[in-house]
Amino acid sequence: ISCCPCANLMTAEPEATPGEWKLVSTSDNVVLYRRSRAGPGHYESKAIGEVSASTAVVHAVIDDLDSYSRFMPYTLECRVLKREGDSVLTYQRVSAPLVSDRDYTLRVRTTSKTVEGGTSYLSRWETENALGPVEIRGIIRVKLCEGGWLLEPMGPNSTRATYSVYTDSGGVIPALIKNTGSQIGIRKIFTAIRKQVRDAKYAK
């Protein structure tokens, strides 16, 4: 559960038809798309990739919020503020190259259902800054961050993971840095998860 700090892609290119997903890249076994949206975020990103682990294990990694600062890219701080029912309130601070640190509080809701081949998980999040820590001088507060993870079984030890994010990263970031940073950041998230699922603690 992570809002890439540069996740709204560059706006200098011709816009895709609203609502139409446009292929951006296929590097590092991650298929990355974007589509235009009316609003401060300009673009929504979607990435799809396979992870060599069951959906339960991948979900356990994504739900391990207290460990994000040790394995998620650019995550300087991540802590759970409250868990209640199917939702969790979490504060995160990200520190990406070439831009100022950013922070936000997210409300994450997760549901699961039995499907052919196993269990699918859907986690969706949105900003809930009013329920988190107050703004800190020198750190840019991200006001808009929506996204999610959809985990679908492809076999007993294989997951089709779909990551989506729509965010206004705040501040002034040159378009080239936004574009490059977004693509690299999203691919790094997949790389981190593919590595983290090997940790034996998630098999429990």
Image (tube, rainbow, N blue to C red):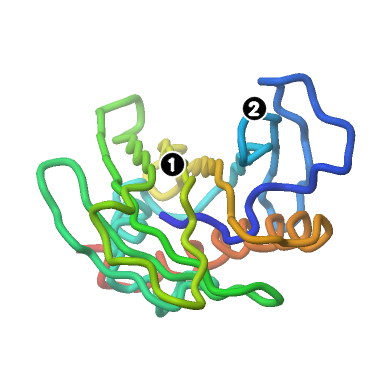
Comes first in the chain, label 2 or label 1: 2
**On screen, residue 180 above or below 76:** above
Give left or right: position of 139 versus 105.
Answer: right
Between the C-alphas of marks 2 and 1, the distance is: 19 Å
Q: Position of residue 77 (x, y in %)?
A: 38, 76
Quarter of the image where one finds residue 74? bottom right
Nearer the camera: disc 2 or disc 1: 2
Which of the image's four quarters has the N terminus? Answer: bottom left
Q: Nearer the viewer, residue 58 or 177?
A: 177
Q: Secondary structure at mark 2?
A: loop
Residue at the image point whose x is 73% and y is 57% from the top = 178
Q: Secondary structure at mark 1?
A: strand
Q: Nearer the viewer, residue 98 or 88?
A: 98
Q: Which residue is mark 2?
A: 38
Label of residue 148 in the image: 1
Residue at the image point whose x is 79% and y is 61% from the top = 174
Crowding around mark 2 (Cα neighbors within 10 Å: few <14, some 14 to 19, many 20+) is few
